Amino acid sequence: MMAPNEKAAKNQFYTSLERTGAGYFDYYLLHALMDNNYTKYDKFHIWDFVKEQKEKGLIKHYGFSFHGSPKLLEKLLTDHPDVEFVQLQINYADWENPEVASRANYEIARRHGKSIVVMEPVKGGTLANPPAAVKKLFDDYDPNMSYASWAIRFAASLDGIMTVLSGMSSLEQMEDNLSYMKDFKPLNDEEQKIIQQAQRIMGNSSTIPCTACRYCTKGCPKNIPIPEIFSAANKEIGNGQRDEALSDYKKAVESVGKASDCINCKQCERACPQHIKITDHLKKCAEMLEK
Ligand code: SF4
Ligand code: SF4
C-alpha cells in the first residue's frame, strides 16, 4: 500500500530490514508504479533514498514493479537510469493488450538495457485454464504439457529475463513447474507459432482480464469478493461452463457481498493495476450469475 507521507514510506524500508533480519537486500523493489501514483515517489524523495541505501550497502540492486503505460515507463527509465531491473506483467494473452502493454513495456525496458522480472506469467491462474479452443491447440501438440507450462515458458523464453515469478500455490504446481524449468528449453519455432494462434484466439475472448491480485478487495465497503466473482464468470464467458460458473459464484458470495450489492463507489477501480472497469463487469456478472 502507498505510504501516506515521506516518513512512513521510508520507514517501510527499515521495517522490512528489521523484520527479515537479512542485514541488507540483494534486490529491492519499489512497489507498483503506475500513472496515478508515480509522482509520490518523487514527492517523498524515494529515488534518492534507495540510492543512498545502495551506497550504504543496504541494497545491492534496486528496481521497480510497474503497472503503467509505455509512455510512463519510458519516462521513468529515462529519469532514473540507475534503476537496474524492472518487474513487468508479461504473459502471452496480454502481449498486445493495450491496457497491460506487455510487449511495448518489455521492449522499452530492453531498449534501456534493463533486466526483467516477470510477474503474472499465468495471469493470476487464468492461463492454467484457458478457453477451450486454446486448450485444444495445446493438447493437439502435446497433451502432456500443462497449460500453465505454455504460459511460463513463453515468458521465460524472452531475452533478458532475470526470473519468472510463477506464483505457485500447491505441491502439484511446484512439481509441474520443476518438470520444465529445471532443464529449461525455450519455446521452439513450432511452439511459438502455436502461442501466436492462442494469442489470436485470446484476443477474441471477452473474458475479464483479472489476475486475482486482490488489490481491489481491501477497501470494498460491501466486502465483495471481486476476483472470485470474475473467475466464476470467466468459466462461463471463456469456456461455456455455466454450471461450474454458477456453483463457484454461489460459494464465493455465500457469506459476503454479492455482485449486485455494489454501490458504485469505485474504490476498487482506483486500486486495480489492470485498469479493469470493475463496476461495469460486476453489473454483467450479477445479470449472468444471480438470475
Ligand atoms: S465500487 Fe462496488 S465493488 Fe468496488 S469498492 Fe465500491 S462497492 Fe466494492
Ligand atoms: S485489482 Fe483488478 S486485477 Fe486485481 S483482483 Fe481486483 S479486479 Fe482483479
Image (tube, rainbow, N blue to C red):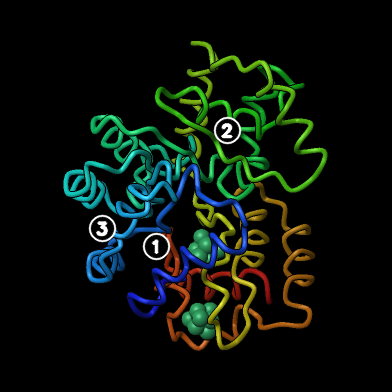
Q: Gap between marks 1 and 2, in whole Å?
A: 22 Å
Q: Are marks 3 and 2 in contact (CB under 8 Å)?
A: no
Q: Position of residue 174 (x, y in %)?
A: 76, 36
Query: Where does the C terminus fall, quadrant-wise?
Result: bottom right
Front of the two marks 3 and 1 = 3
* Dot placed on the residue nearer the N-terminal end, 1 or 2: 2
Secondary element under disc 1, as helix, strand or loop, is loop
Q: Nearer the viewer, residue 192 or 39?
A: 39
Q: Please tell me whether residue 107 is drawn above or below residue 38 in the rendered image.
A: above
Residue 265 vs residue 14, the one in the foreground: 14
CA distance for labels 3 and 1: 29 Å
Q: Secondary structure at mark 2?
A: helix
Q: CA distance from mark 3 to mark 2?
A: 37 Å
Q: Residue at x 63, y 82 (%)?
A: 223
User: Residue 31 occupies which quadrant of the picture?
Assistant: bottom left
How would you rate the neighbour count of disc 3 (Cα within 10 Å): few for under 14, some for 14-19, many for 20 or more? few
Q: Which residue is mark 2?
A: 151
